[in-house]
Image (tube, helix red, strand yellow):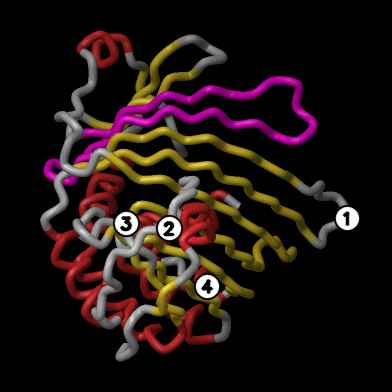
Amino acid sequence: MKKTLAIMTGFVMILMLAACSETAKPVDETASGNANGTNKEETKTEEKSGLTLEEVLTKSTEASEGLKSFSVKMDMSQQMSSDSEAAESMNIDSVIDMDVTTDPAAFYQKMTMSMEGAEESYDIESYFTEKGMFLFDAAGEKWMKFPKEMSDDLLQMSSQQTNPGEELKKLQQFADDFTFEQDAESYILKLKANGEKFNEFVRETAAETLPPELAANGEMLENMKINGVEYEIVIDKETFYPNVLNMIMEMEIAADDQKIAMKQTMNGQYSNYNKVEAITVPQEVIDTAIEMEIE
């Protein structure tokens, strides 16, 4: 399951940074306000944009290429089950607050994770910079540092994912599958996708963004199947940055003579574009962190 989640993380990171020949259809302000995570009670009479989906993708690509930093708050739930009689289903809910910079690639994250049936939730704090990956072990009340090889792989992976310009171009192959709407402040892109072409896109994305030892596992990638994905990207009309990403993905992966099914629901709110200060690991964390041993 951990390898599966790594693939999905790479895919989700690309989509959250990103966000065709038809212009966007106007939508009801109240409905679109809910999509944006806001409660609009007044209807604006601002003139509707005549940009096409292709033009919005191009402008969003250009804006994302110049992106220096942002913040994200994400609510995520994962439901996992197996066809093995010995395996139990697993439901995990997470709330994530993260600050991200793209040059240099770095992030600071606080996450609260709870598991169905567990009495307590888990708080996880982490830093990821050129100094390495540091994670606070709440149970042991100590900081841990990932091995250099793993940190280097994560740094390379993060560098690729935080340059969404090239990845946005790949999304244009799904332009015919999008619905394209707008309200007074935002463009709203929605996609319901399934079928082999989407599986191929995920495999190609994984091969390009995962660490080499995972990307080289062709059998694992071939055994992964995307049953369906729905996502909504809300892009600001003025800045062309994404403000919202809501996603539901259902997938299966065959591993160790069993089939694992996973449904992931994610609701993300993005803010503080180009306003996040440089992320540095406190010296106390560097001095006291214990290096993890991973086989």
Circles 4 and 3, Cβ within 8 Å, touching? The answer is: no
| Nearer-N-terminus badge (2/3) | 2
Q: Closest to the observer: 12 or 239?
A: 239
Q: Residues within 10 Å of mark 2 (few under 14, many from 20)?
A: few
Frontmost of labels 1 and 3 is 3
Q: Amino acid at mark 2?
A: Thr
Q: Does residue 185 lie above or below 229 as drawn?
A: above
Looking at the rendered structure, the secondary structure element under dot 1 is loop
Q: Amino acid at mark 3?
A: Pro
Left or right, 86 with reference to 94: right
Q: Quadrant of residue 60?
A: bottom left
Magenta region's main secondary structure?
strand
Image spot of residue 127 (x, y percent): 31, 28
Q: Quadrant of residue 192?
A: bottom right
From the image, tell me which residue sits under label 3: 242
Q: What is the CA distance from the residue labelled 4 to the residue labelled 2?
A: 53 Å
| Nearer-N-terminus badge (4/2) | 2
From the image, tell me which residue sits under label 1: 85
Looking at the rendered structure, the secondary structure element under dot 2 is loop
| Nearer-N-terminus badge (4/3) | 4
From the image, tell me which residue sits under label 2: 43
Count of marks, rendered view:
4
Q: Amino acid at mark 1?
A: Glu
Going 46% across and 79% down the picture, which residue do you hit?
179
| Nearer-N-terminus badge (2/1) | 2
From the image, tell me which residue sits under label 4: 219
